[in-house]
Amino acid sequence: MDWGTNLWDQNDVIDKHTQAGLDLLERYIKFVKERTEIEQNYAKQLRNMTKKYSKRGSKEEQECKFSNHASFQEILNELGDYAGQRELIAENMTANISDKLTKYLQDLKQERKTYLSDVKKAQQNLESSFKHLESIKKRFAKEWAEADKATQQADKLESDSNNSKIDVDKAKNHALARMRTAEECRNSYAAELQKYNKEQNHFYYTEIPQIFNKLQDMDERRIRQMAEGYCQFSHIEKNVLPIISKCLEGIAAAGTKIDEKKDSKLLIEQYKSGFERPADVEFEDYSQGVKPSNSESGLNPLKGRKHKIFKKHKITQAEKHMVLFMFSMI
Amino acid sequence: MDWGTNLWDQNDVIDKHTQAGLDLLERYIKFVKERTEIEQNYAKQLRNMTKKYSKRGSKEEQECKFSNHASFQEILNELGDYAGQRELIAENMTANISDKLTKYLQDLKQERKTYLSDVKKAQQNLESSFKHLESIKKRFAKEWAEADKATQQADKLESDSNNSKIDVDKAKNHALARMRTAEECRNSYAAELQKYNKEQNHFYYTEIPQIFNKLQDMDERRIRQMAEGYCQFSHIEKNVLPIISKCLEGIAAAGTKIDEKKDSKLLIEQYKSGFERPADVEFEDYSQGVKPSNSESGLNPLKGRKHKIFKKHKITQAEKHMVLFMFSMI
């Protein structure tokens, strides 16, 4: 089923149809570019968000020893990788679809233009041959009419006996000469007609069908390229799905491995002072010669300190050895 | 390993640690909300794009008979479904993570506030008991000093033989009375001390450890909830992956089923005129009595038309039957 044979008289249809095909290709390229921008924007937003929440201050690093803090950081890392995969989708869509098809579209546009211009040239050639044939045909008609008229005049002179033989012979010779010229024109017209019909035959059976078949081939190549581009649109994303799945598994794993008991224990390990709880306050028996004292003085080196039930800061090892625990002053 | 026993003197550490825990929870909620917005925005952009490219004019419907046009529409439909899945991710993250954890955070904040206030109250009670004990101790010290002084004065009067027995007895009685009062203060101090030590014991061994253990339990509950929230962050997206995969398969299928030969054939079916190609132009032999004619007249009903090699419009069935093909006029 080829256009050359079946649509030989549908130049306009083929013109419009191949244009609509290129329009669709152009629309698809625009569509993929737009998708690429959306994907880039999406990846960028995800990446900015992961950076924003991955504050790496010394405080955060301290906290990251706790599994529930550490896992959040792991989730951010996984989401960063996830964003990287979305960027890869955008990059591959640009390289494997948009850029490729844009180049292809330019080539097809040029190719189509050439074919349509070939059709036009062939049309113009045939039209000009036809006009030439018409003019030769008209000349034959005119010459034949003149010859016919001259013959009739010669016959008329001959039938009138008043005319001299010389005049009759002169008219007869004139008519004969015209008839000879007319015969020549007839032969010339016949030859030109044969030539034209050969040309017309070539136009309808060879030249135009060949160009139309080239246009059909071009359109089918465009369709195959588009089909490939459609499939790529799916495959590029499908290719990153396993890695995206792994990122999601990494996030779930980060959630699963959180151990709240371990986190509670870690706090103890980091901050346990090791001090005994305060002993009972002793009886100060002034009746046995003990000098009156108040709680702000005595054996405790932390003299003058206010009564405090809890320390307000983490005690260092040095401090631990250096001071008597403040509770002993009570 | 419980905080109550091991971190009994680390109120400040526990205060800060549980606050950091709630801060992390709050940060995670903000993070999920931000991700949700990104996801919604992404879905919206995809949806708008599919709508923009799904122009449903009569021209597009006509073109959609061709497989390469139809498949593009299918891709747009699949991408619309895809966008729907991204919307679902956003919706489920809001419902199953953000909303849930926000409610939970409010409860935890209230609970923590209550515990820390309980600690403060217990501290204040113990401090005020201690102050009370101090004042009673001081009264005993003062009374004992007075009694001691009175006793010394009585002894001094007695050792001086110039003093009358009455004066000595008076001083002795006075000293005895003071000593009795001092003894009473001593007993009162002893009783108060016992009471205080019991209270202090309760504070350090029962009251504070219990509250700290409640804070530990609260913190561990928070961690478990967060771990669940981390896992949800992964599962919500993992749950839509099979449908997203199907959308991608649908896109690939739309690309694969494109048939360029069928599309070419369809154009023939739609536009084939069925006319024969023009026959040879016939010889008009004026020498055999044919009247001169030009191509703009003759048997063809399309009189006065310009010589055309291709039709410029699609011919209707009615036209097909009505007219003789214009080529016959050549």
Image (cartoon, coloured by chain):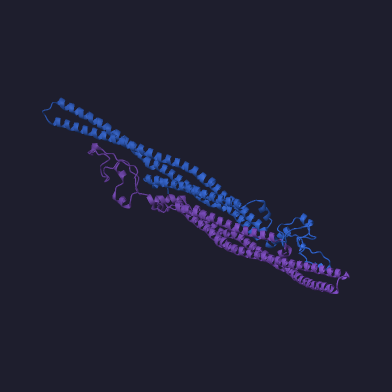
Chain colours: A purple, B blue
Q: Residue at x 50, y 42 (%)?
A: B103
Left or right, A178 with reference to B228: right
The C terminus of chain B lies in which quarter of the figure? bottom right
Q: Write down the quadrant of residue A120 in the picture.
A: bottom right
Q: Is residue B253 visible?
A: no
Q: Write down the quadrant of residue A298 in the picture.
A: top left
Of the pair B25 and A110, the residue shown nearer to us: A110
Left or right, A169 with reference to B2: right
Question: x%, y% of residue A58?
Answer: 39, 53
Question: x%, y% of residue B130?
Answer: 32, 37
Quick one: which residue is furthest to the left in this view?
B162
Q: What count of labels does the image hold?
A: 0
Up the image or down, A273 lies above or below A194; here it is above
Of the pair B238 and B217, the residue shown nearer to us: B238
Q: Write down the quadrant of residue B167 in the picture.
A: top left
Of the pair A141 and B157, the residue shown nearer to us: A141
Quick one: which residue is furthest to the top in this view?
B166
Question: x%, y% of residue B69?
Answer: 65, 57
Question: x%, y% of residue A208?
Answer: 70, 66
Left or right, A64 with reference to A296: right
Of the pair B179 and A52, the residue shown nearer to us: A52
Q: Is residue B312 visible?
A: yes
